Image (tube, grey):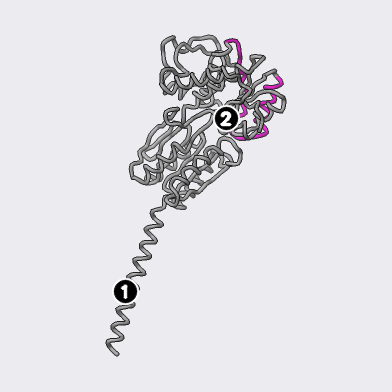
């Protein structure tokens, strides 16, 4: 009887040890999953800026499988409330947080300083911290190429541009686009209207309509939705998209081309560095060499010789034989801002607050 009791106790003890070990294994497996927070300025369904960011997030999820768990927060205002959203993501266990819009940066830096053991990734800004990076791509290169196409297709030489905010990012893009336009038609102009919003379909459309009413026959944009492009093609005019392939979304060949992003090409190596324990704060500005940026397929309405010219210019940029802000540059008052033979530094491009010759409008 005593022997049976002893054997039963041994069995129970072994079972308890095994159960405990199994629980530890399950806990370890749960701990191994990296929780990733992603904050979007607009709903990914806008088919624009946040949509392309979410495509990058999806690519990252597919790459890592069950090693990561993503928590998405969308349509988050660029104000103090974004700090509470980040705090909530940290409370949910996120060890790295991405935020995809310029004006999140100060709020992200505030949270980063409070949580030194969490990694933060801010898109398009310049602020950083030992545990916070900023990242963006050299979209100005694709802007230039799209400007070449716009100039070739514009019969009037009057091109419109719907801009969100007067940040260096947007100003740089308008300038690059205009330099591309003027490379093809030195007399062409680019008229800018500001909406003072990243995402407002109604205001974006109104901005495009105002430009069309002024006689612009091509509409470009730095906005988050397809509304400016839609307004243009509805008038029988041309459009230059942005972020996603607007030609497919709008469904009209008069969308001539769209400068596009590959955000997954940044997110994947960043998440890998967290998993490897090698993450470091950086200011990243990737371009053609990292395949961060590209053009959508060019509309068949664009002549073949123009397509070849664009491809040749893109190859020059890829090979670093030439870039957009090289050589003499005048502002739209006629003053020389950069002399012949000079190359604009990254710092100057990242803080630019003036328009190049050919732009009709004011930064302030």
Q: Which residue ends up furthest to the front in the rendered image?
A: 304
Figure quadrant of the C terminus: top right
Figure quadrant of the N terminus: bottom left
Vertical order, 12 against 82 (above or below): below
Which residue is pictured at 55% across the width and 29% down the height? 296
Q: Residues within 10 Å of mark 2 (few under 14, many from 20)?
A: many
Which residue is pictured at 33% across the width and 42% down the height? 278
Residue 357 image-quadrant placement: top right
Residue 302 image-quadrant placement: top right
**Position in image of residue 343 (x %, y %):** 42, 16
Give the left or right position of residue 237, taking residue 91 as reference. Answer: right
Mark 2 touches mark 1? (CB < 8 Å) = no
Sequence-first disc among 2 and 1:
1
**Position in image of residue 281 (x %, y %):** 37, 37
Q: Which residue is mark 1?
A: 14
Residue 233 image-quadrant placement: top right
Q: Which residue is mark 2?
A: 242
Q: Secondary structure at mark 1?
A: helix
Q: Which residue ends up furthest to the bottom in the rendered image?
A: 1
Q: Which residues are magenta?
A: 186-213
Which residue is pictured at 44% across the width and 45% down the height? 63
**Position in image of residue 202 (x %, y %):** 68, 33
Vertical order, 102 against 321 (above or below): below
């Amino acid at each position: 009887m005593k022997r049976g009791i002893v054997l039963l106790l041994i069995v129970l003890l072994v079972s308890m040890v095994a159960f405990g070990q199994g629980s530890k294994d399950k806990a370890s497996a749960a701990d191994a999953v990296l929780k990733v927070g992603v904050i979007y300025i607009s709903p990914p369904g806008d088919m624009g800026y946040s949509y392309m960011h979410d495509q990058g997030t999806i690519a990252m999820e597919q790459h890592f499988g069950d090693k990561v768990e993503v928590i998405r927060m969308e349509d988050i205002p660029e104000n103090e409330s974004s700090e509470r959203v980040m705090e909530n993501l940290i409370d949910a266990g996120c060890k790295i947080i991405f935020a995809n819009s310029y004006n999140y940066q100060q709020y992200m830096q505030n949270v980063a300083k409070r949580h030194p053991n969490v990694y933060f990734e801010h898109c398009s800004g310049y602020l950083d911290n030992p545990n916070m990076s900023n990242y963006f791509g050299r979209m100005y290169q694709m802007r230039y190429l799209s400007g070449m196409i716009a100039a070739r297709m514009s019969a009037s030489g009057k091109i419109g541009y719907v801009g969100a905010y007067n940040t260096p990012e947007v100003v740089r893009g308008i300038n690059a686009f205009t330099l591309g336009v003027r490379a093809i038609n030195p007399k062409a102009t680019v008229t800018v209207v500001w909406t003072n919003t990243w995402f407002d379909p109604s205001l974006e459309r109104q901005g495009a309509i105002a430009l069309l009413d002024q006689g612009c026959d091509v509409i470009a944009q730095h906005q988050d939705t397809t509304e400016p492009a839609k307004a243009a093609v509805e008038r029988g005019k041309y459009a230059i998209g942005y972020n996603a392939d607007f030609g497919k979304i709008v469904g009209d060949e008069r969308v001539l081309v769209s400068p596009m992003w590959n955000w997954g090409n940044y997110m994947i190596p960043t998440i890998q560095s967290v998993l490897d324990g090698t993450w470091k704060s950086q200011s990243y500005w990737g371009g053609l060499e990292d395949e961060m940026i590209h053009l959508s397929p060019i509309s068949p309405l664009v002549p073949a010789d123009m397509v070849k010219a664009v491809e040749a210019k893109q190859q020059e940029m890829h090979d670093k034989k030439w870039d957009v802000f090289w050589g003499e540059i005048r502002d739209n008052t006629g003053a020389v801002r950069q002399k012949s033979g000079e190359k604009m530094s990254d710092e100057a491009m990242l803080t630019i607050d003036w328009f190049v010759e050919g732009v009709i409008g004011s930064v302030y």
